[in-house]
Amino acid sequence: MSQKNHEGKKSARERLQEQREKEKARARRRRQAIVAGAVVVVLAVAGGIAVWASSSSGKPAANDNEVAVPKQASGGGRPAVPVGSADAPSTLTVWEDFRCPACRQFETGFRPVIHELEDSGRLKSEYHLVTIIDGNAGGQGSRNAANAALCAQDAGKFRAYHDLLYSHQPPEPQDKFGDKKYLLQLAGKVKGLVTPAFTKCVNDGTYDRFVKKSNDAFATSGYRGTPTVLLNGKDLSKEKGGQFGPADLKKMVLDANKAKQPGKKSAAPHTGASPQDKHPGRSAAPKGEPTGRSAAPQGELTGRSGAPAS
């Protein structure tokens, strides 16, 4: 082979490699743009991180008698944690992953309205915790954070710790929530949460099976990503073409609740202030006013988070 031909082939290989690197860079930028532009909820394409990444084992979920269930949580085929009055007339169902950037956008933008509606007895929420990012990006942060939140449920502080986790969510590629010491450190910000029982629960992974069962249920649910958010069974990603904001959620709940009495009996205590609450169990926004706007225009439900791992 002549030196000229050798250099020509080498140059072709280099050009091909450069092209591949450019394509990878474009793909990364697209993923970042999706997350950055997904303005608070990301539900328009029915949730963010695709089901292919849910890493379900394909094995049947463990039987209920083999799975530890947190206080007042529901086991069964779709394990969930309730927040708010058990007899509230409307129900918000949320499937989410603590490492999911789109879930953080949803929680950040809609949190004040959800809290207001929960605290007034108009809405109860059911949280289904999944581990899609662990399957997509590797690590154990989704599972460990979910387990820690369930440990907080035992202490009656699920909502406060749940919100705290989203307020301190690391960048998606970083598995900071995989560090149980960090999860315990964050728990110190919720008054009265860190006890020997809570610490043992976190370190032992007491509810790891509960989390796995919830993730398995998501993998077979037909939903396409996180967050998946439903109000009284209605998929909010399909409302208003995805341009659905906190004020729209409040209006839907109030319309659905007409002539119905607010709930009174608490489904699960949620003592301890959430990051944006001024007082335990109170919304940061005045009652009766639309709340929950994000830094992005109107806090709309637009787009969704997530793309296949490259």
Image (cartoon, helix red, strand yellow):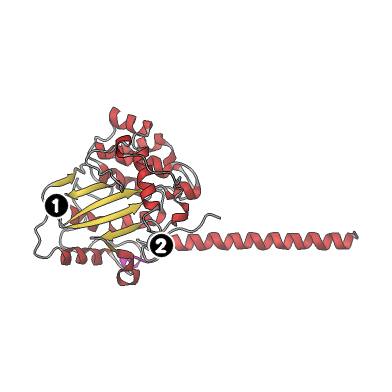
- At horizontal 42% and vertical 59% (from top left) the residue drawn is 305
- At horizontal 24% and vertical 52% (from top left) the residue drawn is 125
- Vertical placement of residue 154 versus 298, above or below: above
**Which region shows up in magenta?**
297-302
Q: Amino acid at mark 1?
A: Asp
- At horizontal 51% and vertical 63% (from top left) the residue drawn is 30
Percent of width and height locating residue 221: 36, 55
Q: Nearer the viewer, residue 98 or 78?
A: 78
Circle 1 packing at 10 Å, graded few (<14), some (14-19), many (20+), is some
Q: Which mark is residue 87?
A: 1
Horizontal side, residue 166 vs residue 10: left or right: left
Q: Nearer the viewer, residue 217 or 116?
A: 217
Percent of width and height locating residue 96: 35, 52
Residue 93 in view of the camera: yes
Q: Amino acid at mark 2?
A: Arg
Give whichever of discs 2 and 1 has the lower sequence position: 1
Q: Which residue is mark 2?
A: 304
Percent of width and height locating residue 248: 24, 67
Q: Residue furthest bottom?
A: 241
